[in-house]
Amino acid sequence: MNKAILFLLLLICTTTMVMSEGQKENSSNKVKLVFTSWRTEDIDRMNRINKTFTKQHPNIEIDFQPIKDTEYDAQLKQSLAAGTGADIIFLRSYDSGYQIYKTDSLIDLNKMIPELDSFPKAAVDAWSTPENIHYGIPAAGVVHGVYYRKSIFEKYNLPIPKTWNEFITICNTLQSKGETVFAQGTKDNWMLYEVIYSGLGANFYGGEEARQRLLSKEAHITDTNFLTAFEKINELKEFFPERFEGIDYVTMQQIFGTGNAAMFIGGSWEIGIFEDLGGLDDVGYFAPPVAEDGDLLQYCFHVDAGVAMNKNTKYPEEAKLYMTWLASPEFAQLYMNELPGFFSYTPGEYELTNKLAKEMESYVPGSEATVRTVWEKLSAQAPSGNELMGEAIQKMYAGELTPNEAAEYVDKGLSWYYE
């Protein structure tokens, strides 16, 4: 073979091999990070948020894979134990998240995310060990209160209630006019504790100061102030819809979201759901009514969602890069815009674009912040305070327990805590 032809063939062959290898390398460099959550309703909104990151880092794909809320914790533990857990994980605060950390599945963030030093300490502590190891970025807090239909309130010229008596008066008026007062159902009991008791009850049991006495074991849930909260939320039962025992969480959202009830006791995270159902301009919000005029609002501003990193991820460098972005003001602003009602803890100057979110936030300066009643420490083992409260209130609304018996049900179940 002619030397020139041989050289040309070798050159072509070598070039082809390099090009082939280059394409393969480029293809293999595309990394997919799986990001999981307990909010299946957020897929489209989270995908829009993540587009900003992947545009800046085209070699990384974020695959948002949420799991049904009621199955999330169990599936998360199983997947992490099996080595198939997501790379990035939305993590509940305090005891629930700490249980995941204790499986030795999460990476310590103290050195990886130094920005955590500038976050509010109370928020960082919700995803930290007693030894001050941080395992979650505080992504967002949520508030609890009452949504209402503006058109129905305007129809009867009803004012926004500030006190509990004013609130009950409005309930009576709406009921006398034949309106469905609340969309509330009791089939899913977590709402009864997390939103109704912790949200509306805090004004009666004394908010954060009283919660701290529970944490220090100086108080019991059977104490008069906590019992009063049971009694007050029990007053709302007569305004629930017929056959409320069979109404689940999604159905009550549909009832209110489609304008078929005057009020809905809910969390700020539901703005997006009502927005997707349409007619958000007709939805208003007010904070939990105080016991007496002039009382300081005890506002349940719950540290809700943190973000953790699987220490066994196959792509630690890419996951670290994404985690750093999740701790940035850019993500915080995008998150609050796309998911109104979630309030970021990331330091920075932000503008809320949603009117309802602004309304919810407007109550913060004139209030004392607290979190859900037994979320911290009292839910560290079974039976957890969270489960007991939900069960007790569900039984109370079903008429199986009096408010006093409901409080005793919880206190008895928490005997492990006071030992």
Image: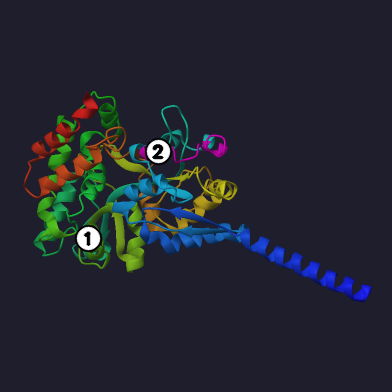
Residue 331 in view, yes or no: yes
Q: Main secondary structure of the magenta part?
A: loop
As drawn, 197 above or below 16? above
Disc ID at residue 252:
1
As drawn, 118 above or below 75? above
Could you tell me the amino acid type at mark 2?
Thr
Q: Position of residue 81 (x, y in %)?
A: 40, 44
Could you tell me the amino acid type at mark 1?
Met
Q: Position of residue 241 (x, y in %)?
A: 13, 60
As drawn, 55 above or below 305? below
State the SS at label 2: loop
Proximity of marks 1 and 2: CB atoms separated by less than 8 Å: no
Q: Position of residue 373 (x, y in %)?
A: 26, 37
Residue projecting furthest to the front? 1
Of circles 1 and 2, the one toward us is 2
Label 1 crowd bin: few (<14), some (14–19), many (20+), radius 10 Å: many
State which region is magenta.
99-116
Tell which circle, 1 or 2, labels the residue nearer the N-terminal end: 2
